[in-house]
Amino acid sequence: MFTHLSTETRQIIASLYGLPDADVAWVFPPDSSQGDLSTSVALKIAGGLGKKPQEIARSIADAISLSPSVEHAEVAGPGYVNIRLTVARLLEAWKEAHAAIAPVSERDENPVIVDFCGPNIAKPLGAHHLGSHIIGQAIINLYRHTGAHVIGWSYPGDWGTQFGKLWVAYDRWGDKKKSLKDVTVEDLLALYVRFHEEAEKDATLDDAARAAFRKIEEGDAALRSFWADTVAVTKKDLDEIYVRLHVHIDRETGESFYENRMQPIIEEGIAKGVFQEGEGGSLIVPFAEETGMPPLLIRKGDGATLYATRDLAMIRYRIDTAHPSAMYYVVDVAQRLHFQQVFATAALLGWEMPEHEHTVFGRMRFSGAAMSTRKGTSLRMRQLLDEAVKRAGDIITERGDAIQADDPKDLAEMMGVGAVAYGILSQNRAMDIVFDWDRMLSFEGNSAPYLQYTHARARSVLRKAALAGDPVLPAVDVLEPEDRKLLLMLLRFPIVLAESRDARMPHKLTNYLYALCQSFNSFYNSVPILQATAPLRDLRLVLTASVADMLRTGASLLTIRVPDRM
Ligand code: ARG
């Protein structure tokens, strides 16, 4: 947005000091009284030049003040150069920033793969799965919106002896009157739990389960069809939740998909001496002592492969078929060692890896409590969402006339689910993610309801203005301080989108949206908008519409909807 200023400044430094490519960055200072933009380049180059930073800053300020974009330049503190831009330049920059509300069309390039969701088949989604779904989707949205070719790729856990157990349990205790298609995920879970209870008393059950899973692997028609039904039942349940969460999976290959793609890798690993014989005829990857990593089990003594073996097969498959430029795995911190080992193994195999990262997120818990139900079982995602929507509904009822909603039920859904998503995304994902109902549903804080409320407030101003179309930017040559402040806040939007995407840190975007809400609300409270006279009134309506649009775009990137009225 301000690259031309950096170029101009670089030229100034080149001609004054003979330094051809100084690292010039113009940034928004924390406090707008320090000017619109600020650079610390004088401080950076002073040492090498053996001059006082303030002296250099003075010379740069004098020269840059002649730029047509600059109204005024000054030196501050130990050697910063602060500038005020001309109104024309600011408005031009605003147009550029505002354009970032529209998605950039997809570039023709190698894709970024975001590994997310990865639910386990035949089990209800737990509240702790929200992280991978919501954070993964937000990251995907950020890439896609800014023009990247991105594939949101899910890797469901649909394979393993648990399906043998499930078959044995269904065979003995399942309700055969019900068609398998009508069985719910909760029924499947109950069967699985029952299996474990009974297996404590009857050791033959485990053998039966292993045998049943072997049959599934061998392609036994009846067992395969049972397995496929459990997958279908789970998918139906997931789809419902995904609609509520605004989660969309582009590609999906379950663990079963890699069943016959592991053998070539096992052979490659043995041939390259990376996979070695471990205890009891197993196959392992021993890592160098200084890595501190325990060996990775690739194949058990009985020939069974593991989660890690399949993850390796998936890396190979993705590289060979999709040619990704990057692979990001949005998976919780409990799997940190797993990914370290898998990536290290790929390196030992000599695979040419694209950029890759375990895009880790912390443990999710309630403030002061683990995420489980009173009975100690893990809390379902559906229960958590329903609880949030119920609480949002209560707030709407409590506020009575203070909240206007055309459809209070829909507003409660939007607020409740949005509060949960925002609650997760607004925290630095690298840390524990703490749930706090009061904070998440607050109308004043860094929360979805506050964002939604601010959006509705801006839309309401625009409705009252009763314009025929979008407000049009008028010709203005002076800005009042409040207008300038809000305008500068709007300019940050595309920069924040890029930063949030590149760091894969959605909280950078929520922090910004929160600041934007605060700026708008203080603007709204301190200057007249509808009562202002032209051209100020038009300018303020333009700013108001821009706030509303950026809030809506930002929220939707975070999977959150915003109401027009509230
Ligand atoms: N199904 C796994 C789980 O629930 C998550 C999958 C993560 N992705 C991966 N490529 N391993 O723990």
Image: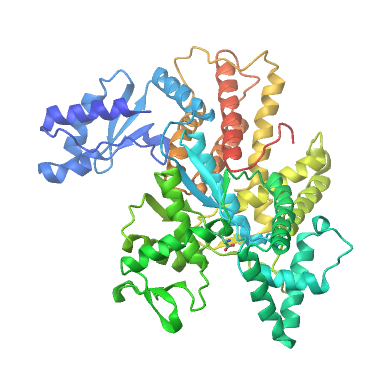
Compared to 275, does 556 lie above or below? above
Q: Is residue 508 left or right of residue 348?
A: right
Q: Residue at x 72, y 53 (%)?
A: 232
In the picture shown, does residue 154 fall above or below 187?
Answer: above
Residue 391 appears at what percent x and percent y?
77, 53
| Front-lying residue, 375 or 52 | 375
Colour logic = rainbow
> What residue is rendered at 10% in x and 32% in y?
18
Q: Is residue 555 above or below residue 130?
A: above
Q: For the image shown, how many numbered marks are present on the structure?
A: 0
Can the viewer see residue 490 in this picture? yes
**Depicted 401 relative to depicted 299: above or below:** above
- Residue nearer the viewer, 41 or 387: 387
Task: Give the image quarter of residue 174.
Answer: bottom right
Instruction: Answer with the quadrant where ligand 1 appears in the image.
Output: bottom right
Residue 289 picture location, percent across and down? 30, 76
Q: Residue furthest right?
A: 177
Spot occupied by residue 518 in the image (x, y as percentages of width and height): 57, 40
Identify the residue shown where x is 63% and y is 50%.
421
**Quadrant assignment for the N terminus:** top left
Is residue 369 visible from the viewing direction of this image? Answer: no
Name the spot of residue 4 as percent of width and height, x first. 30, 25
> In what quadrant of the picture does the C terminus appear?
top right
